[in-house]
Image (cartoon, helix red, strand yellow):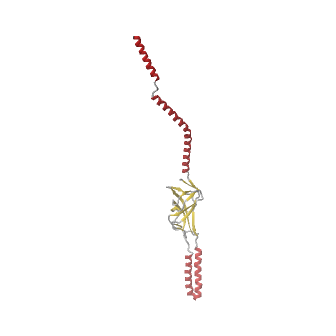
């Protein structure tokens, strides 16, 4: 009896063991396998895109650097370029003196290629390097001015430009001759009109005519009115930051 009971228990144990071995794997194992496969696929895709991405990034960086450098490159206004300015105040051989400063503005755009290097309206400063009024020195009146700086984007750029000179020739000798000739001619007319008294009257009239001639041909000082345009020529190239 006991032997049969033991044999029956053994059979039941073996049956449960066989059923346990034949049970399908758990869902967790399936999910783990699926996740591993997906990870492998993603890694493979990244590996395929990596070379293209690595090749693109250096090129993009290079293009960015080149663009940045091109943007920073200054415009070079070559020597010999003309810069026309409009004077902010009047200058003259008589009203100005050596060492005086003056201001003004650029009268028209200065281009380098198709780019505006110096815009119209940019403020400028200059100085009077020589001023000789009429009568102070032989040879007439003269005025010389220089362009010193231009303000562009808030920065004053020193300028090396050729000085601009203006002059008026004196006419003193010509005036004196005309005045003396008028007096002599008056005296001749007065003598023909009636002798000594007529000669005196004629001489006075002739002198008046001579004086009128002096006023008509009169000497002049150099005067540059406010808002006059003056054109300077660069002696050295000028670099303008963009």
* Residue 190, above or below 94: below
Front-lying residue, 95 or 67: 67
Residue at horizontal 55 percent and vertical 78 percent from the top: 212
- Residue 102 at least partly seen: no
Taking the view exactly as shown, the residue that stands out farthest to the bottom is 194
Q: Position of residue 68 (x, y in %)?
A: 54, 48
- In this figure, what is the number of numbered marks? 0
**Residue at the image position 59 percent from the left and 78 percent from the top:** 178
Residue in the picture at 56% in, 80% down = 209
Q: Is residue 8 visible?
A: yes
Whole-percent x, y for residue 149 in the image: 53, 58
Q: In this rendered view, identify the residue nearer to me: 188 or 141.
A: 141
Whether residue 199 is situated above or below residue 219 in the rendered picture = below
Query: Which residue reaches farthest left?
Result: 1
- In percent of width and height, residue 146 lies at 55, 61
- Quadrant of the image occupied by residue 143: bottom right
Name the one closer to the observer, 138 or 112. Answer: 112
Relative to residue 237, is residue 19 drawn left or right?
left
Q: Which image quadrant: the N terminus?
A: top left
Q: Nearer the viewer, residue 17 or 42?
A: 17
Q: Quadrant of residue 210?
A: bottom right
Residue 37 at x, y percent in the picture: 51, 32
- The residue that appears at 52% across and 34% down in the rendered structure is 41
């Amino acid at each position: 009896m006991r032997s049969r009971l033991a044999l029956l228990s053994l059979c039941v144990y073996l049956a449960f063991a066989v059923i346990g071995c034949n049970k399908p794997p758990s869902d967790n194992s399936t999910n783990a396998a699926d996740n591993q496969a997906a990870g492998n696929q993603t890694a493979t895709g990244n590996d395929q895109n990596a070379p293209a991405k690595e090749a693109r990034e250096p090129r993009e960086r290079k293009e960015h650097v080149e663009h940045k450098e091109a943007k920073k490159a200054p415009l070079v206004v070559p020597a010999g370029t003309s810069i026309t300015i409009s004077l902010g105040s009047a200058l003259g051989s008589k009203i100005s003196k050596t060492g005086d400063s003056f201001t003004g503005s650029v009268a028209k755009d200065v281009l380098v290629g198709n780019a505006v290097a110096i815009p119209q309206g940019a403020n400028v400063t200059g100085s009077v390097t020589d001023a000789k009024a009429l009568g102070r020195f032989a040879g007439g009146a003269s005025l010389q001015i220089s362009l010193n700086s231009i303000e562009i984007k808030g920065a004053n750029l020193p300028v090396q430009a050729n000085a601009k000179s203006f002059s008026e020739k004196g006419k003193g000798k010509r005036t004196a001759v005309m005045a003396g000739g008028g007096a002599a001619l008056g005296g001749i007319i007065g003598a023909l009109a009636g002798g000594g008294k007529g000669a005196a009257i004629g001489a006075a009239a002739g002198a008046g005519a001579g004086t009128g001639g002096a006023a008509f041909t009169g000497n002049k000082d150099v005067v540059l009115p406010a808002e006059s345009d003056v054109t300077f020529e660069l002696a050295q190239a000028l670099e303008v930051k963009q």
